[in-house]
Amino acid sequence: MDRTVPSGAALLLVFVYETETSRTPPECYEVIYAHRQDRLPKPLTRMTVDEVIAAQRTWSRHHGSSAAGAPQFIRKTLMGLKEELGLRGSQVFDANMQDRLAYHLLIRRGYHQFVNGEISRTEFGRRLSGEWASFPVLEDTRGAHRPVQRGQSYYAGDSLNNALVSPEKVEAVLDRVYAAANANAPTLVSRPQPEVKPERVTKSKRFWTWLLTGVGTPLAALGNLHPAAQIAIVALIAGFAVYAITSMPAVRRTLGLL
């Protein structure tokens, strides 16, 4: 498996390859439809992308389908991938190339959404069955040609394709894929917060400012006003000073209010 393919996707692709070709790596990479690869002029994995696309033009007539390689790319799919990904026709259609292209098909069908929990296992299964005809749908749905039941191919009714694996086995594999993809997910660890030592009341500038205001301002105002006015001013300023001082966290902590 190409090293750029993550573990969860690699697990799923190996299952796809075996289901589609009845072969395991490395033999699966050489397979064309109906296992007629022995009729090719050279092994599939030694052909270039353009050579495969050119040869596929007649495979449907001669072999029944143009499907090629472990992922069984049909000609239309391979041509689309070449254009979408900007492949050079001279690139070799080897095992690593097939892996990378097949992984791109998984992404198209919602691999990232599935492993991130954004779509259900059943929905991802439906999308996979639309890419690989050997996969069954996981619930009753509308297929490519008619309504299909759980366990049938999405393409049932075309006289060519049938599901080659049970829905239960697909579900089991998808559960393993999900677990593998999330096994190394980063865990958020909260950082310990540094302990903040409370400020001593007697060292607080705010404390001394309001204390001196509460005491000094009334004294400065006593000489020039009527006694009743003096009392009112003293009470008002003292009230503000007391409120300001007692609202300080350090003071409230000292008084047992926190």
Image (cartoon, rainbow, N blue to C red):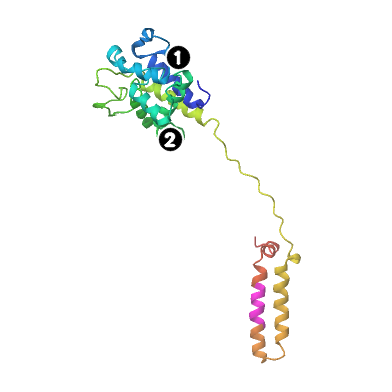
Amino acid of disc 2: Gln
Residue 164 appears in the picture as rendered: no
Between 50 and 232, the one lying in front of the other is: 50
Q: Position of residue 89 (x, y in %)?
A: 42, 23
Q: Give the prevailing secondary structure in the magenta stretch.
A: helix
Could you say where residue 48 lies in the image, as x and y percent from the top left? 43, 18
Res 211 label: none
Q: Residues within 10 Å of mark 1 (few under 14, many from 20)?
A: some
Q: Quadrant of residue 109?
A: top left
Q: Secondary structure at mark 1?
A: helix
Q: Secondary structure at mark 2?
A: helix
Disc 1 from disc 2: Cα separation: 34 Å
In this view of the protein, which residue sits in the foreground, 98 or 209? 98
Judged left or right of residue 99, residue 219 is: right
Say which residue appears at 40% left-offset and 23% top-offset. Answer: 170
Check residue 17 for magenta coloring: no
Res. 142 image quadrant: top left
Which residue is identified by label 2? 113
Q: Nearer the viewer, residue 145 or 221?
A: 145
Give the labeled residue for mark 1.
46
In percent of width and height, residue 206 lies at 70, 69
Residue span colored magenta: 234-242
Residue at the right extreme, as displayed: 202
Residue 241 higher or lower than 229, as above or below: above
Quick one: label 2, few (<14), some, or many (20+) residues within 10 Å?
A: few
The amino acid on which the numbered mark 1 sits, given as a three-letter code, is: Arg
Q: Is residue 236 magenta?
A: yes
Q: Quarter-wise, where is residue 44 in the image?
A: top left
Q: Do the residues under discs 1 and 2 have CB atoms within 8 angstroms?
A: no
- The answer to whether 59 appears left or right of 220 in the picture is left
- Label whose residue precedes the other's in the sequence (1 or 2): 1
